[in-house]
């Protein structure tokens, strides 16, 4: 594919005698087509060339023309560059057709390894809405990096250890006969936990039961370990159901317990570097910044969350030698990750500490602005939320298209896709609003709208009958087609931008733009016409648009039905 940006950079670099890389990084894509396909902000060179941006622009303008460039306009200190549309359209379309399913994908593996720590729920509870965002965002990043050829390792750092699960086990030991574990064991387990906790709140001495369980687990007591493993199994069964729906996968389920025998190393290395200091009976590492110290051992001498994260980091360094380690975890844990990364750095792993990044995100709020799950009556488990979304979708489909085959399967894709897209529609740091009317709307900025656009492209292809393998794409010479092609041409760049900012919403916004411009094209122009050559070009434009929407949604973890 012709890299127009590169070609323009080469020219400006030759004209100004300023390095190609520097020029290339200044070239921008303007927000709308009236301002050209590329724009060059000449003020970036003003200092170096000791000239005003205006003068620089006027000097470059007459020298930059050529076979790829249609015209150049100087606006303010900007050089707005319009490329020859037909050359661009033909080039993008041929490229997309030639690569088919792999369009935009990096086929040669690169040698970079990225560990992504995401989802990571705490066992002994049903999958809670609180872990929706980590799962959705992490899953999208996992797929995005794979698409770009990275070696990606998805880790589910299960919260499978500590006082939480020990409370549940203690309660189970006392009251197991009162509950039925045959139907929905995870709920019975949750009830036991809640009951135990309520008593402990009133009577702090009650904690001793859970503390005793923790001791037994640490001593590998057979009976206690058996119950613990059973709780993990039951929890994972619940999570797997949801992961399957979400099309979400992991390469490792090494949770907190996996590091039980790897904690001494953390403590020993910290001691060897004289980093452990006593503070109110606990052992901590002091931080440079104005933040609280990182606790490593409690006053009882037990390890905690941060200690386990450090052990996990040493393990990931040894086993994956990562170039990046991303933690997709709510912004509430920002301080925790600062402390962990700084401690790792002080331990002598500065290079790896720099490669670690916390990827925070905002809350999930209901339509009244309350944190989801905090009020009675709201669905709070992911299973419930997806069930509700799927059944609502089924209802809509039954109204709109009662004769559709496989309605249940379609409703699954639409219902799950709707929830996922809502989560990824805006930048992750913003709070997400969970409003059913919004989420499932077929014509808002939603997952169903995008799936529907895809389905429409497929139905156009069916109507056209035969999908050609090539066409004269210079016939796509109207403004609406051009806008669609322009977006198709920037698919790869968009995925790269999403990866470099760890921001899947960049792809969501892109897909909405693509779908909207396709609708404009489709409203203005007949795909099926008497002019066979024009029809071929438009049919292929329709096909490629559908392919890119499907691929892009796939990167977000959303599947497309063929009909809906
Ligand atoms: N289980 C934790 C929680 O629910 C999230 C774990 C995130 N990953 C990590 N390596 N700390 O809060």
Image (cartoon, rainbow, N blue to C red):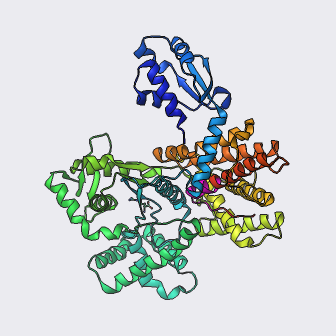
- Say if 141 sits above or below 406 in the image: above
Q: Nearer the viewer, residue 247 or 69?
A: 69
Question: From this viewpoint, which residue is outermost toward the bottom?
Answer: 177
Majority secondary structure in the magenta region: helix
Instruction: Name the residue located 54 percent from the left edge and 42 percent from the top edge.
Output: 1
Residue 498 lies, in percent from the top left, at 51, 46
Residue 41 lies, in percent from the top left, at 52, 22
Q: Nearer the viewer, residue 109 or 211?
A: 109
Residue 332 lies, in percent from the top left, at 45, 51
Task: Specify the segment rendered in magenta.
Answer: 549-559
Residue 191 lies, in percent from the top left, at 52, 75
- Say if 27 sits above or below 141 in the image: above
Instruction: Please indicate, yes or no, whether residue 536 appears anywhere in the rendered image.
Output: yes
Q: Nearer the viewer, residue 126 or 532?
A: 532
Please say whether residue 328 is one of the residues in the magenta stretch. no
Please say whether residue 556 is one of the residues in the magenta stretch. yes
Instruction: Name the residue located 81 percent from the left edge and 43 percent from the top edge.
Output: 525
Instruction: Please indicate, yes or no, whether residue 367 appears anywhere in the rendered image.
Output: no
Instruction: Name the residue located 39 percent from the left edge and 70 percent from the top edge.
Output: 160
**Residue 30 found in image quarter:** top right
Q: Quadrant of ligand 1?
A: bottom left
- Say if 284 sits above or below 42 in the image: below
Instruction: Name the residue located 69 percent from the left edge and 63 percent from the top edge.
Output: 414
Task: Give left or right: position of 552 versus 159.
Answer: right
| Image quadrant in which the C terminus is located | bottom right
């Amino acid at each position: 594919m012709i890299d127009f940006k590169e070609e323009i950079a080469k020219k400006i670099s030759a004209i100004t005698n300023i390095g190609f890389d520097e020029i290339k990084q200044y070239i921008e894509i303007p927000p709308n087509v009236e301002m050209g396909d590329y724009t060059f902000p000449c003020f970036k060179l003003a200092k170096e060339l000791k000239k005003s941006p205006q003068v620089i622009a006027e000097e470059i303008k007459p020298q930059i023309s050529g076979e790829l460039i249609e015209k150049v306009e100087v606006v303010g200190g900007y050089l707005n560059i319009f490329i020859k549309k037909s050359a661009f359209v033909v080039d993008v379309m041929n490229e997309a057709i030639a690569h088919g399913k792999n369009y935009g994908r990096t086929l040669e593996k690169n040698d970079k390894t990225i560990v992504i720590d995401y989802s990571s729920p705490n066992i002994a509870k049903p999958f809670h809405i609180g872990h929706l965002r980590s799962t959705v965002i992490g899953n999208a990043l996992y797929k995005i990096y794979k698409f770009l050829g990275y070696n990606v390792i998805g880790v589910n750092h299960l919260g499978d250890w500590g006082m939480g699960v020990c409370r549940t086990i203690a309660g189970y030991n006392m009251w197991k006969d009162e509950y039925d574990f045959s139907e929905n064991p995870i709920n019975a387990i949750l009830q036991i936990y809640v009951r135990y906790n309520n008593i402990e709140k009133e009577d702090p001495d009650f904690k001793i039961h859970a503390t005793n369980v923790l001791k037994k687990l640490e001593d590998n007591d057979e009976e206690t370990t058996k119950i613990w493993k059973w709780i993990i199994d039951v929890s994972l069964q619940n999570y797997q159901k949801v992961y399957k729906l979400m099309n979400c996968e992991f390469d490792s389920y090494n949770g907190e317990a996996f590091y039980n025998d790897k904690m001494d190393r953390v403590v020993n290395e910290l001691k060897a570097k004289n980093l452990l200091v006593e503070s109110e009976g606990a052992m901590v590492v002091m931080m440079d910044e104005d933040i609280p110290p990182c606790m490593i051992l409690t006053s009882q001498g037990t390890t905690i969350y941060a200690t386990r994260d450090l052990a996990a980091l040493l393990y990931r360094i040894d086993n994956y030698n990562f170039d990046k380690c991303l933690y997709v975890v709510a912004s509430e844990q920002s301080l925790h990750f600062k402390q962990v990364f700084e401690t790792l750095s002080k331990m002598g792993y500065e290079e790896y500490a720099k490669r670690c990044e916390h990827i925070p995100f905002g809350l999930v709020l209901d339509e009244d602005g309350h944190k989801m799950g905090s009020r009675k009556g709201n669905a709070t488990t992911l299973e419930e939320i997806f069930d509700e979304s799927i059944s609502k979708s089924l209802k809509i489909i039954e109204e709109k298209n009662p004769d559709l085959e496989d309605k249940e399967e379609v409703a699954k894709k639409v219902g799950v896709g709707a929830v996922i897209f809502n989560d990824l529609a805006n930048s992750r740091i913003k709070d997400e609003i969970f409003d059913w009317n919004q989420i499932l709307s077929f014509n808002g900025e939603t997952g169903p709208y995008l799936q529907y656009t895809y389905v429409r492209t497929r139905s156009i292809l069916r109507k056209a009958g035969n999908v050609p393998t090539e066409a004269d794409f210079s016939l796509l010479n109207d403004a609406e087609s051009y806008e669609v092609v322009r977006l198709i041409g920037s698919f790869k760049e968009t995925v790269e931008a999403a990866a470099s900012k760890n921001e899947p919403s960049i792809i969501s916004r892109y897909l909405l733009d693509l779908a909207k411009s396709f609708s404009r094209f489709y409203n203005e122009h007949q795909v099926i016409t008497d002019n066979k050559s024009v029809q071929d070009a438009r049919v292929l434009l329709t096909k490629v648009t559908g392919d890119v929407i499907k691929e892009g949604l796939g990167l977000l973890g959303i599947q497309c039905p063929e009909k809906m």
